[in-house]
């Protein structure tokens, strides 16, 4: 990204002396920073959350906790950050006030498509004590309904046949741990930071499933020696837009090809279980270290993530572009408040000293932030991987207790219409989902009948499992919601639900 003559200089270590007054800049000597963490999936969220926490700790108590980034698919982050000496701007956006911070915690970035040997060497290095992950739900090559490894996934099959050149995150982790074992080195901690139920235990199971397909002894060594703590992460980080690039120049006075935008709120709850106890003192930067993450995880998945998905599908069908647009619409706002109050909070255990109704009000205030434009289309992506933990787990609890599921059913039915690929105005929807072809095949011969289309999608066990497909109450509630959405439209239906 060369500068044009009328553009400011590029962000770099040499140009930090010219950064605009008011910009926060890391205080440590970046030249002395050693990599102690390898992060797989170095996207916007990781740079606005995990890197932010780590940068704060390095400022306060400098140590060997630099972050080496790894992207398994796309080299864009590496190519944008390398000319900037791995620096970037994090812009905290609160209403109409932006505050900028330049983060220096990243030490290097590799892309698997052409840095495979460097990645293998990095993960084999004893200096790497933690491998953290934000690869999204679909990155784990698993059955989201059952929580086990999808052995026939093309990437898993590739990795079994080419163990020295893995493509999947599960294959990469297992190959690196196998090399650590073979070389007599200590293992690293695997720290999953994705929105998955019991994410540490889940990733441990997936790695052990894969390792057992290679070697039973390797699977047992991993089970005995490797720590997989669970986490809960929370910060709204919308995709970076061209306008954000301009705003970064305005904020710091330098050109930044890789800024990230985030809301003021952040939360990180971590199970304090690391190999040899080696980790940064993240609690000093505001993280919460606990023995059990589960109540925090359930609260976030069921209140924040579930409401995001419900608003994404119903909002998209109703013509809204962002979450902020949805909650500024009185009927959608009342809908999500009722969804929390009537169907989610009654089956969600509260973490210690937490009022779930107050937490819901705090979420609504965050959604109201007019400067955070979190597009519903972005949230709607990969719904097959998100629904099981965001909406279906809560639905199962309500069904088990004979509690209402009407608002949950409408959110699920809206997803079904969305993945059908045509909106209420007859326009095609750009459906991005790893099971998109499965949806198309399931719906190909159903005809226009709402009952038939709902039955075809509920029959996909990878999403709904066999239990929901066999539940007459669930099938009837979703079929009725689907039919009403098709006949009356999302806006009118949401108004009745509010």
Image (cartoon, rainbow, N blue to C red):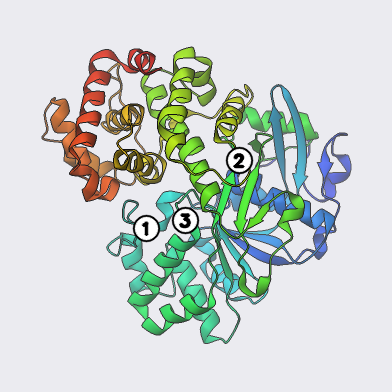
Q: Find disc 2 in the rendering and name its residue.
A: 354
Q: Find disc 3 in the rendering and name its residue.
A: 198
Q: Crowding near pointer 1: few (<14 within 10 Å), some, many (20+)?
A: many
Distance from the alpha carbon under mark 3 to that under mark 1: 16 Å
Q: Is residue 332 left or right of residue 156?
A: right
Q: In this picture, is 497 found above or below 73?
A: above
Determine whether the residue tagged by mark 2 lies in a helix, strand or loop.
loop
Determine whether the residue tagged by mark 3 lies in a helix, strand or loop.
loop
**Residue displayed at 33% across by 73% down:** 161
Q: Is residue 47 left or right of residue 283?
A: left
Q: Position of residue 77 (x, y in %)?
A: 59, 49
Q: Crowding near pointer 2: few (<14 within 10 Å), some, many (20+)?
A: few
The foreground one among 452 and 493 is: 493
* Residue 6 in view in this figure: no
**Residue displayed at 65% across by 77% down:** 126
Tell me the tag on residue 141.
Answer: 1
Q: In this picture, is 175 found above or below 32?
A: below
């Amino acid at each position: 990204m060369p500068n044009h003559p009328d553009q400011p200089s590029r962000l770099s270590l040499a140009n930090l002396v010219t950064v605009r007054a008011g910009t926060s800049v890391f205080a440590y000597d970046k030249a002395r920073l050693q990599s102690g963490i390898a992060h797989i999936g170095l996207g916007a969220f990781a740079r606005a959350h995990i890197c932010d926490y780590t940068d704060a700790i390095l400022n306060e108590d400098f140590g060997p906790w630099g972050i080496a980034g790894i992207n398994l698919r796309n080299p864009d982050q590496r190519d944008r950050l390398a000319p900037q000496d791995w620096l970037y701007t994090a812009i905290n956006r609160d209403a109409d006030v932006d505050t900028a911070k330049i983060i220096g915690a990243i030490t290097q970035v590799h892309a698997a498509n052409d840095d495979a040997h460097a990645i293998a060497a990095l993960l084999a290095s004893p200096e790497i004590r933690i491998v953290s992950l934000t690869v999204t739900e679909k990155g784990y090559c698993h059955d989201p309904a059952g929580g086990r490894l999808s052995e026939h996934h093309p990437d898993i099959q590739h990795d079994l046949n080419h163990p020295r050149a893995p493509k999947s995150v599960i294959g990469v982790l297992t190959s690196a741990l196998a090399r650590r074992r073979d070389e007599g080195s200590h293992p690293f901690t695997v720290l999953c930071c994705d929105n998955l139920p019991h994410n540490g235990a889940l990733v441990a199971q997936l790695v052990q499933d894969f390792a057992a397909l290679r070697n039973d002894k390797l699977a047992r060594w991993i089970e005995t020696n490797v720590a997989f703590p669970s986490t809960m992460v929370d910060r709204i980080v919308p995709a970076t837009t061209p306008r954000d690039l301009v705003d970064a120049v305005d904020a710091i006075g330098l050109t930044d090809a890789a800024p990230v935008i985030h809301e003021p709120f952040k939360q990180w709850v971590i199970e304090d279980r690391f190999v040899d106890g080696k980790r940064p003192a993240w609690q000093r930067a505001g993280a919460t270290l606990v023995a059990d993450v589960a109540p925090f995880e359930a609260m976030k998945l069921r209140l924040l993530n579930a409401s995001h998905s419900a608003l994404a599908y119903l909002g998209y069908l109703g013509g809204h572009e962002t979450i902020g647009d949805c909650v500024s619409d009185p009927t959608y706002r009342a809908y999500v408040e009722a969804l929390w109050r009537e169907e989610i909070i009654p089956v969600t255990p509260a973490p210690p000293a937490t009022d779930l109704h107050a937490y819901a009000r705090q979420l609504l205030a965050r959604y109201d932030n007019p400067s955070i434009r979190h597009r519903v289309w972005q949230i709607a992506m990969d719904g097959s991987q998100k629904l099981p933990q965001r909406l279906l787990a809560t639905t199962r609890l309500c069904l088990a207790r004979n509690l209402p599921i009407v608002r949950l059913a409408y959110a699920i039915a809206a997803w079904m219409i969305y993945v059908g690929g045509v909106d209420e105005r007859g326009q095609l929807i750009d459906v991005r989902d790893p099971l998109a072809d499965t949806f198309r095949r399931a719906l190909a011969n159903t005809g226009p009948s709402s009952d038939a289309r709902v039955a075809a999608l509920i029959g996909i066990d990878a999403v709904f499992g066999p239990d929901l497909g066999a539940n007459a109450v669930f099938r009837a509630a979703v079929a009725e919601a689907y039919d009403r959405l098709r006949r009356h439209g999302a806006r009118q239906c949401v108004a009745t639900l509010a």
